[in-house]
Image (cartoon, rainbow, N blue to C red):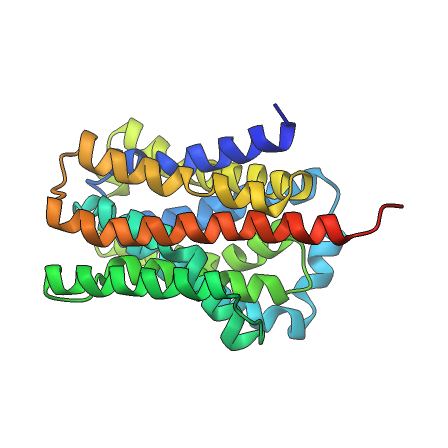
């Protein structure tokens, strides 16, 4: 098997079992978990930058205000995405979180059309419309918008849009983002601790260890994904990306017993069909482009 495929599967597998990780420390409030996740993620990625000898480049990035400004926005988007996800998982909405990452590729297409002036092909339009109908159906069934899934999809979509236009590699960019949120996260934990509302000091050693380990748990799949993206083509990566939300969906239903009524299958079925059409169209289009490219 291609080494890049193995890296990609590893990344998506780790993202797929994230609900189990957050459930393990659900005794800690979601906001406090995110505070720890920001702090330990920054320290983890910063250590990698120092070890790899890229400290000089990172320091130069921090001094470039024009480069930093977009990362302030991406850091806020990442914070909202993480907080929504962790809260939703621990509140019993794992299935709805999976919905967000199922529709994320289609949100990316829409954002590309609006902000990057990309033109949608006919089957891409069909996929987007079909997914919209699925969301509309789920809204009707729930009696309200599936806001958890939509929040995750759009925050991650806009996050990806900013990263696409950023002139910094993924590791440096992630270090900048978590570095921006490091001080607010540290202040949050200090305030909670001083006021007696922080629970870190009262938790077991296992929970404390898992909170500290959130840095590695967050950074490792990102590193695997970044490596895979450089080795394998985007169409393969596009197919593999559904591993994570599929695992999350199955964990929510089979492991934690979340309700998934037959009626909801219609809405999810529309979205899954839209993703299937979208993925097949991407592969066919790529093959056509490659067949038209003259060989050297």
Residue 164 visible in the displayed image? yes
Residue 260 quadrant: top left
How far across and down, in percent of the image, does residue 156 sit?
Answer: 43, 59
Tell me the quadrant of the picture where the N terminus can be found.
Answer: top right
Viewer-proximal residue among 167 and 238: 238
**Residue farthest to the top, as pictured:** 1
* Residue 111 located left or right of residue 200: right
* Residue 167 located left or right of residue 181: right
In this rendering, the answer to whether 161 lies above or below 198 is below
Viewer-proximal residue among 131 and 159: 131
* Residue 255 located left or right of residue 59: left
How far across and down, in percent of the image, does residue 62 sit?
Answer: 66, 64
Viewer-proximal residue among 281 and 188: 281
How far across and down, in percent of the image, does residue 284 sit?
Answer: 58, 49
* Residue 234 located left or right of residue 124: right
Residue 34 visible in the displayed image? no
């Amino acid at each position: 098997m291609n080494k890049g495929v193995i890296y990609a599967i590893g990344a998506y597998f780790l993202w797929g079992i994230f609900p189990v990780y957050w459930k393990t420390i659900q005794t800690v409030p979601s906001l406090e978990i995110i505070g720890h996740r920001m702090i330990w993620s920054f320290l983890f990625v910063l250590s990698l930058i120092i070890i790899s000898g890229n400290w000089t480049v990172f320091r130069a990035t921090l001094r470039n205000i024009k480069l930093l400004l977009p990362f302030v926005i991406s850091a806020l988007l990442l914070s909202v995405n993480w907080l929504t996800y962790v809260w939703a998982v621990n509140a019993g909405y794992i299935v709805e979180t999976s919905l967000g990452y199922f529709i994320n590729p289609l949100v990316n297409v829409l954002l590309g059309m609006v902000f990057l002036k990309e033109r949608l092909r006919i089957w891409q339009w069909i996929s987007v419309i079909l997914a919209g109908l699925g969301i509309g159906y789920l809204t009707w069934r729930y009696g309200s918008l599936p806001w958890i899934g939509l929040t995750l999809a759009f925050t991650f979509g806009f996050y990806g849009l900013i990263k696409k236009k950023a002139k910094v590699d993924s590791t440096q960019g992630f270090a900048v983002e978590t570095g921006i949120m490091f001080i607010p996260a540290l202040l949050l934990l200090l305030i909670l601790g001083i006021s007696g509302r922080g629970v870190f000091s009262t938790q077991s050693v296992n929970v404390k260890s898992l909170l500290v380990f959130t840095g590695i748990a967050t950074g490792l799949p990102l590193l695997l994904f970044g490596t895979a993206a450089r080795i394998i083509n985007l169409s393969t990566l596009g197919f593999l990306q559904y591993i994570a939300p599929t695992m999350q969906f199955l964990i929510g239903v089979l492991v934690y017993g979340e309700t998934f009524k037959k009626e909801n299958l219609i809405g999810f079925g529309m979205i899954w069909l839209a993703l299937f059409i979208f993925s097949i169209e991407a592969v066919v289009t790529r093959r056509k482009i490659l067949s038209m490219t003259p060989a050297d």
